[in-house]
Image (cartoon, rainbow, N blue to C red):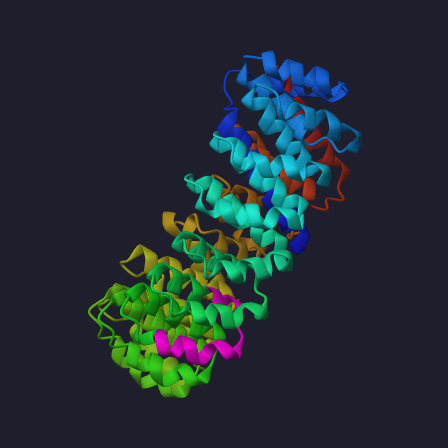
Amino acid sequence: MLHVKTLQVIKLYNMYSYLLRRLLARRGKSEEEIERLSKIVEQEKDIEKLLKRLRRERNPDTRRVIAEHLVNIQDRRAVDTFMKALKDDSRNIQIVSITALGNLRARRAVTSLIQALTHENDYIREAAAIALGKIKDEKAVEPLIRALKDRDSFVREKVIWALGEMGTLALYPLTDALTDEDERIRERAARILGIIQDDTAVYPLADALEDEKEAVREAAAYSLGSIQDDRAGEPLIQILEDKNEAVREAAAAALGALKDVRAVEPLILVLEDNHGTVRKKAATALGKLKDERAVDPLIRTLEDENGAVRKAAVIALGAFKDERVVDFLIQALKDEDSYIREGAATALGELKDETTVEPLIQALKDSNTTVRKKAARALGKLKDERAVDPLAQALKDEWIHQDTAVLLDIVGHTHVLEPLIQALESEWIQQDMAQALQKIKDDTLAESLILAIQTRDKNVHRFVAQALALLIIDSSPIQRQVQRIEYEKRRVQR
């Protein structure tokens, strides 16, 4: 599993890449030309020269390569150059400079970046918010809170992200913002406090549950669920009777996250709510609470007129380690309602009871594609040898064939290699499968993958080659064969 910090870095990289792609759309040049251009740009050390080239360049591919190089410069001596470039007439230059200053964590640039939050250009304001979120300077908190009113939704989302990154630095200004005269600021401040997840915000958020605007009450309820502090239980139970269904829905979801047993009886009553989305959240919350008092009410909810509610109820029942629930769910696999069959299959996968293997194998033949897929996933979680051959056979089903979760669960069984190799044809799961197939230390797999390189298209070839590279193959002849195929492919492409 990736380290949390690694995930955050990837998230930030994707955020910057997305912003740059929106600004510098790619088109025209081949991959080989772009790679050659990248090497040339990387060798250039004069930042001002690169900025000038970016200003006059008309080809979007070239602009993208230069921009990506500039924003990833890690030399802090470049800060002055980028700060000077913030005053450039070119929008491209300004955005690249803002992004680079954020990556460099340049505190000297905070005042200029704060000013950029009010720039007329949406992209510049968006880049400034991201940069300030990375620098994490307390001076930026109040300006970012004011920017929560920005007219552009992309900018607002980046401002919310930036304040969330500020953490406790933004805590007290955000709790103060819960009483701001502007409802937009109150609602977004409530959302951000849920991202920060500091229990200091519990009482201010509880007070916000009484706000006159339903959007604020809803955001406060969800955030209290994120913080998961027992003190939020009573206020959340009270707003299960709120006049607005979205607020009641948020309260039910939050109480499920809190796992507060005081909420069991109130949530059972909410199963009779007039709105299906609220009843669905209540059923899901009761499943999380796992209190036996909820079993019979959840069973009665299977008669609900709303299919999504029925599905939520049957999935919730799967949380109860109760023999009568297991028997009920097995019977539910044959229910005429596909929502119930789907929920039953999902629930049985969570129960991991070996008595459910055969009924789930039968469910692989269900007339409904979603039920078949959920049954396959459930069998994958059970990891019972009896399910391997039925699952391998089920891979002929296109819907199951494209389900990464199922494929990865049977990846350790070498006698079903061919269906796994075939699964690489699905563009949705190629990378997952390539990484998973490395787990099988078997020359048969290596030979099958080599064949796949020869017979499948270029896109599949890339992921098959990745799997081979990750495999531990001791046989030198096989390694030489792979190298020879790679060489031939490159020669033909040239």
Q: Nearer the viewer, residue 129 or 210?
A: 210
Residue depicted at x 50% and y 24%? 25
Residue depicted at x 57% and y 50%? 142
131 sits to left or right of 107: left
Where is the N terminus found, in terms of image quarters?
bottom right
Q: Which of 26 and 124 is in front in this view?
A: 124
310 sits to left or right of 83: left
For residue 314, what is the image quadrant? Answer: bottom left
Q: In the displayed structure, would residue 361 be above or below residue 70?
A: below
Residue 442 in sight here: no
Q: Residue furthest left?
A: 305
For residue 207, what is the image quadrant? Answer: bottom left
Q: Which of 2 and 59 is in front in this view?
A: 59
Q: In the displayed structure, would residue 453 be above or below residue 272?
A: above
Residue depicted at x 40% and y 74%? 285
Residue 65 in sight here: yes
On the image, the x and y values in percent for residue 183 come to 39, 55
Q: In the displayed structure, would residue 204 be above or below residue 491?
A: below
On the image, the x and y values in percent for residue 400 come to 40, 52
276 sits to left or right of 149: left
242 sits to left or right of 461: left
On the image, the x and y values in percent for residue 226 come to 51, 66
For residue 253, what is the image quadrant? Answer: bottom left
Magenta part of the protein: which range? 223-239
Q: Residue furthest bottom?
A: 293
Where is the C terminus found, in terms of image quarters?
top right
